[in-house]
Image (tube, grey):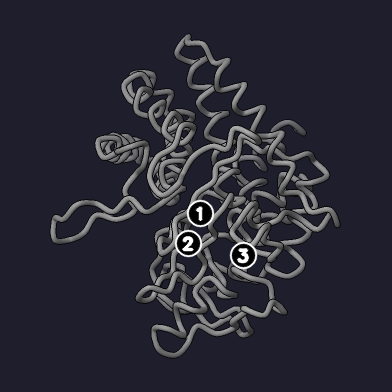
Amino acid sequence: MIALPGLTLVTGRLDSARRILQTFANFIEQGMLPNMFPDSGETPEYNSVDAALWFIEAWRAYIDASGDQAALEEVFPVLESIIRSYRDGTRYGIAMDPADGLIRAGKPGVQLTWMDAKVSDWVVTPRMGKPVEVNALWFNALVAMQAFSTRLGLDASRYAALAERTASGFKRFVRADGDGLLDLLDGPNGDDTSLRPNQILAVSLPATPLSATDQASVVAACGRLLLSSYGLRSLAPGHADYRGQYIGDIWARDGSYHQGTIWGWLLGHYALAEHRVTGNVELALSRLAPLADHLCDAGLGSISEIFDGDAPHKPRGTPLQAWSVACTLEAWWRLSSSNASQQSKTR
């Protein structure tokens, strides 16, 4: 779902986007979207707290691009079931906390966020509690549902009320020192103060619950210690768990997968967030430029999944990663469109 807008909408494949989205709608179960379809035809795995929220965002992007009212009318009950399940509770302890409107998730031994490395029984980054990016996606989904309801001539007040409650609760993520956002609230060991890139989604997604000041603090924090030429580090250097190279056996590699390794898909989100804060299109576009040189580094004409956190940031993982390509394309397209719009206004 993360890759769908960049791979289909940006490239003009609206029909493909609709068919993919409609197919996935058939697999929504207890408000959740499968994280993986086993090749052997076994039951799909539903261990993802963010997939269904990305599904709603993908529908928002598709409807904005296509204006496909008929498809929206058809899928709207499915989207409603997702919100209802997250609000009232579903698998793995996923539910909205009525006290602050935030989504909590987690169960020992299960990896639910995109930071999902697991070796044997070891979940490397369990992140049980209220993850920051999940709640950014939750707020974004509620705003999308409000817009969908209005578009369909339905009462949007319940989604507006939920979004308002979530925005108020989201203030809890703001660090007291003004240095971005906490990565997790109300975990088994309290709040997680680790500097990770997950917070960037609270600024890059279409709907943000943050004030302009807090948005700027997120971009500044990520830009200072996480930003590289090819993406964002998954953990800031200097943290006790930071691993600067993705090397060794499976225990060592998976142990570093989200503990400092750079992820290419996040660079597009950083560029979009920076543009939102600064209004500087050229600066935001310049963040994507190094990836053009990388197209000849690993997978010819493509962007790698990950890179070493330490210089010289050697490409690792799969050399042809859909997320990396799609998020870069989407950011480039949105920024270029914004730039063209600004130029036309000045003529």
Identify the residue at horizontal 64%, vertical 64% (top origin). 196
Q: Mark 1 and mark 3 in contact? Answer it, CB < 8 Å.
A: no
How crowded pointer 3 is (Cα within 10 Å; few <14, some 14-19, many 20+) is rated as few
- Determine which residue is flagged by label 3: 289
The correct choice, above or below, for 263 with respect to 168 in the image is below
SS assignment at label 2: helix
Residue 116 x/y as whole percent: 44, 64
As drawn, the residue found furthest toward the left would be 40
- Compared to residue 249, the image places residue 211 above or below, namely above
Residue at position x 64%, y 34% from top? Answer: 99
Earlier sequence position, callout 3 versus callout 2: 3
* Residue 14, above or below 153: below
Asked if the residue under mark 2 is in contact with the one under mark 1, i.e. CB atoms within 8 Å, the reply is yes
Q: Along the polypeptide, which appears first: circle 1 or circle 3?
A: 3
Residue 157 location (% of width, % of height)? 58, 15
Type of amino acid under label 3: Ala
Residue 324: which numbered mark, if any? 2
- Give coordinates of residue 120: x percent, y percent: 35, 76
Q: Which mark is residue 327?
A: 1
Tell me which corner region of the image, top left, top right, bottom left or bottom right, holds residue 107: bottom left
Closer to us: 176 or 258: 176
Residue 200 appears in the rendering: no
For the residue marked with disc 1, what is the amino acid? Cys
Residue sitting nearer the eye, 341 or 309: 309
- Where is residue 74? Give x, y as percent: 31, 21
Q: Please, what secondary structure does the residue beneath circle 3 have?
A: helix
**259 versus 126 height, above or below:** below
Crowdedness of circle 2 by 10 Å Cα count: few (<14), some, many (20+)? many
Disc 3 from disc 2: Cα separation = 14 Å
